[in-house]
Each structure stands twice: as structure tokens, then as C-alpha cells.
Image (spheres, helix red, strand yellow):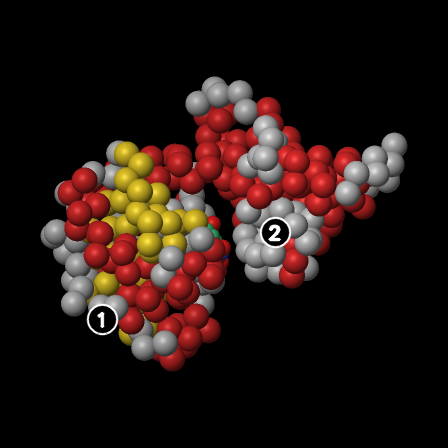
Amino acid sequence: MTDVGFIGLGNMGMPMAGRLFDAGHRVRCYDTSAVALERAAARGLVPCTDVFSAVQDADVVISMLPSGRDVLAVFGERVDGAKLPLRDGCVVIDSSTIDVNSCAAFHRSMSARNLLSLDAPVSGGVEGAAAGTLTFMVGGSQAALDAALPLLGAMGKKIVHAGEACAGQVAKICNNMIAGISMIAVSEALTLAQRLGLDARKLFEISAASSGQCWALTSYAPVPGLVPTAPSNRAYQGGFASELMLKDLRLAEQAAIGSGTPTPLGAAAAALYDIHCKTGKGRLDFSSIVQMLNDSERR
Ligand code: NAD
């Protein structure tokens, strides 16, 4: 049994922490939301009223927080100078999706304390978190990964060592940039085909076996009736929210600007998802971007 301190019990963190509990680990946890702490207690976790009690003497600490600012508020230097009571040998894993600079600062602050740390963002969404089928993209040393593997294995089914510190975050934002851009490409092509009188199913059949083939088309088609398991068949409920896609596209943009890398399609995808979210569709799966194109007037 491992003594785990878990910070951030939202849509993802709660089911992830629950999986650890189900696997027989002792999970003390903390969230700034009192409601989240009540739910945690009902799930068998040990709720703590402050982050210090949650991580005190833990073997492994895991965070699942909204942004880099939140991660650094927990693990970075505090204004009052107080230090998190992390014990020697503790392994600290941040599974949030955050900007690369904050991720680097997180690793630096753990390394200054001689602690092993990993960035381990995930894909698989809330369903994957509940089922323990997440994919972890891991950045950090092999030693840190070896120590973390039993816990990551209880929450996910695929664990990929992307490379050294921050490589997990880089993999996550680059992968989602591909997914965001290609979803728009597939949505544009399906909309154009239909407006030109070609049935969406015909284009699907042809492109699925031609050079237009890609995951956004053959596994996650944005038009209903093409891929039975795709969120488009359930009114774009569930899946990966457009607002989270926008968040990740913005993180990719930020990293692209910071590294002087031209990513014009990434920038265009971020701008389109921004408009889509502003029309109130942020909670719908990101394949709902096709609605924005369908709804737009013919020029
Ligand atoms: P969420 O907003 O549902 O949960 C975040 C939780 O963190 C909230 O309960 C909030 O109260 C808590 N929190 C914020 N600041 C805190 C602090 N300083 N101390 C303790 N608790 C704090 O978000 P989520 O959907 O669970 O996502 C978490 C992370 O996972 C994000 O970085 C997100 O981008 C990433 N992610 C989400 C999904 C998804 O489908 N929801 C998929 C992949 C990755």
C-alpha cells in the first residue's frame, strides 16, 4: 500500500484518486472546494482541510489542477515562505495540462529539494479516468517513472515515457494541436462536400481509404451517422470539451511563440475554437466545431 497525497478533485482528479483507493492505496486529498472534499469522503478518500496535511509524509503526491498558476501556487515558493512538508524520497507527479514554462518551474522547485518529479498529463477524458484507461505522457527521469509506475498503472492503461522533464506536456499540447487542426479540416471537408451535393457517407467511405484518412475522420467523425461511437451521435455530449481543446491550443500557441516556431494552422485553430466557445458551445465535444461551419451563411 502506498500513501498518496492527491491535490485537485475535479472532473478528472476525483475518479483518478478513486481508482487509487480501489487499488488499495491510502489516499489523503485536498481541494479548495468544500463540495469536492465532501464527495471525496463519500468515495472513501481521506479529505484534508489544507494541502499540508494531505501531503505530509506521503510516498507519492499527485496533482490534477486547472492551470500552471495553480500548480505553482501549490508546489512553488510561497509568499509566507512555508514549505510543503514533502518527505525525503517522495515522488511528485503533476498530471495537469499546463504551460511548458510553469512545468519547468515545477520540476526546478522539486529538484531544489532533491525530490523526484514527473509531468504526466493525460488523455482519455473523464470516462478514461473513471475506467482507469487513461494514457499518461510522462516527462522526467527513468528513476522517477519506475517509482511512479504502479500508481500510474492503477489509473491508466498506456504509459509512455516521452523524455526528460516537460516532455510529457510538450507531447500533450503537440498531439492536441494535431487533433484540433485535423478536426477542423475534416469538418470543413464534410461541410463543403454536403453543400456541393455529395453525401457525407460517400466522402467518408472514399476518404477513409484515401489520403484524407485521419483519426478525426475515421474514429471521431464530427457528422452523425458515420462512426457509431463518436460524440456527434449523442449531440456532442461527453468526449473532450471544446473549451479544453481551446485551452490546449492556446498552450501550444504560447509554446510556439516562446520557441519562435511558426504554427499558423495551430493559431487559426485556436481562433476558431475561441469563436465556437464564445457562442456557448464550450462544453460540447470539440467535434461540434462542425456546427459552426454548418451554421455559417453561404458567401
Ligand atoms: P476541474 O476544474 O474539474 O478540477 C480542478 C479542481 O482543482 C477543482 O476541483 C478545483 O477546486 C481544484 N483546485 C484549483 N486550485 C486548487 C488548489 N490550489 N488546491 C487544491 N485544489 C485546487 O478540472 P478537470 O477537468 O479535472 O481537469 C484537471 C486538469 O486535467 C486540467 O489541467 C485539464 O486541462 C486536464 N485534463 C482534463 C480533461 C477532461 O476531460 N476534463 C482531459 C485531459 C486533461
Crowd around label 1: few <14 · some 14–19 · many ≥20 (10 Å): few
Q: Which residue is mark 2?
A: 227
Q: Which mark is residue 24?
A: 1
**Which quadrant of the picture is home to ligand 1?**
bottom left
Give me the disc on residue 177.
Answer: none
Give the amino acid type for the residue marked by disc 2 in the picture.
Val
Please tell me which residue is depicted at 38% across the width and 39% down the height of the picture. Answer: 169
Q: Is residue 241 left or right of residue 93?
A: right
- As helix, strand or loop, the secondary structure at mark 1 comes to loop
**One can see residue 239 in this view:** yes
- Density class for disc 2 (Cα within 10 Å; few <14, some 14-19, many ≥20) is some
Quarter of the image with the C terminus in it: top right
Relative to residue 66, is residue 49 drawn left or right? left
**Which of the image's four quarters has the N terminus?**
bottom left
User: Residue 126 location, x and y as percent?
Assistant: 47, 60
Given residues 144 and 197, the one toward you in this image is 197
Q: Is residue 110 above or below residue 178?
A: below
Q: Residue farthest to the bottom? A: 42
